[in-house]
Amino acid sequence: MKGGLNKNFWHKHGHTVIIYVFLAALMVFVSAFNKDFFTLGNFKNLLRSSFPLLMAALGQTLIILTGGIDLSLGGIVALCNVVCVLAMNPDSAWGFIPALGAAAAVGLACGAVNGALVTKGRLAPIIVTIATTAVFDGMALLLMPNPGGSVHKAFARFLTRGFSGAVPFLLFLVILCLVRSLANTTPYGKALRAIGGSENAAYSTGIRVGKIKFRAYCLAGLLCAMAGIFLSAQMNSADATIGKNYAMNAITATVVGGTAMTGAVGDPLGTIAGVFIISIINNMLNLFGVSSFYQFICQGLILIAALSLSALHKRR
């Protein structure tokens, strides 16, 4: 009985355990070159710099669990970043509230557009989201051709450094718990995985496939809105081109974290480890003075390796 339980645990969570062991080993390796790595201040900085990607990657995880993909997440992040700054009144005590509402509404609307085109239009997610990437990026550039704007200072300080840096961590923890609970323990999460396993089989069991997938894209849009809002506070401005690498990084983090590109299999907790692995590797490459061009190559190789390992594991 005990052996069966252990086998079941490793079948469900083995990849997540392995990826966190790898993350720990990577942190030890990097600490050999950076003596300040294992300090509270550095971990706060790492979380702040990784927070937007964490949000985008969690959204990507929900979509990939259905067997879909969203290449427009970076465009949504950028558009929400621009809208948040444009809607903000930095001189009013509560001038950030309309900005939060506007950014959340835009993120939800973008996700709804993707979801409607995929479910109602019956179009391939990869084609739809390539097209909407151009639309969202174009809208962001129309609204703000050049980086700029100003942010409510008290709001920015609270969101990025409030309670001595604890606010970003608490916000991240709450969102992670909500997303992981949704994906792993609720009927909605089970429906996501059923659709990713076999859409036809899920439909035959009474699952409202279109509705479930539509909601996944909407949730991803809201998470990208959170990323855009945090970037506004972090940069104290907006940049319509800020999201160009988020889609690829979110896919890489999701796959590295153990989510199968074919759908059904994955855990948001693994995605978090994937994000931190990518962030630490990028920081390490920056520390060694490696050109950003080589960093792109490295990210591509990491994604290829993760996909290869995932395919090998599936064959077994």
Image (cartoon, grey):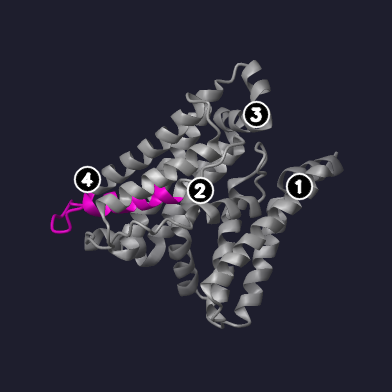
Which stretch did the figure color magenta? 74-98
The answer for how far apart the CA atoms under marks 4 and 2 are is: 25 Å
- Decide: marks 4, 3 in contact (CB < 8 A)? no
The residue at the point 52 percent across, 50 percent down is 57
Q: What residue type is labelled 3?
A: Ala
Q: Earlier in the sequence, mark 4 or mark 3?
A: 4
- In what element is the residue under mark 2? helix
Looking at the rendered image, the disc whose residue lies closer to the viewer, 1 or 3, is 1
Looking at the rendered image, the disc whose residue lies closer to the viewer, 3 or 2, is 3
Figure quadrant of the N terminus: top right
The answer for how far apart the CA atoms under marks 4 and 3 are is: 38 Å
Pick whichever, 144 or 20, lies toward us.
144
Q: Which amino acid does label 4 sit on?
A: Pro
Can you identify the residue that label 4 sits on?
Answer: 98
- Report crowding for label 2: few under 14, some 14 to 19, many 20 or more residues within 10 A (C-alpha): some
Q: Earlier in the sequence, mark 4 or mark 2?
A: 4
- Report crowding for label 3: few under 14, some 14 to 19, many 20 or more residues within 10 A (C-alpha): many
Magenta stretch prevailing secondary structure: helix
**In the rendered image, the vertical position of residue 39 relative to residue 276, given as above or below:** below
Q: Earlier in the sequence, mark 1 or mark 4?
A: 4
- In what element is the residue under mark 3? helix
The answer for how far apart the CA atoms under marks 1 and 4 are is: 46 Å
Looking at the rendered image, the disc whose residue lies closer to the viewer, 1 or 4, is 1
Count of marks, rendered view:
4
Q: Is residue 80 left or right of residue 71?
A: left
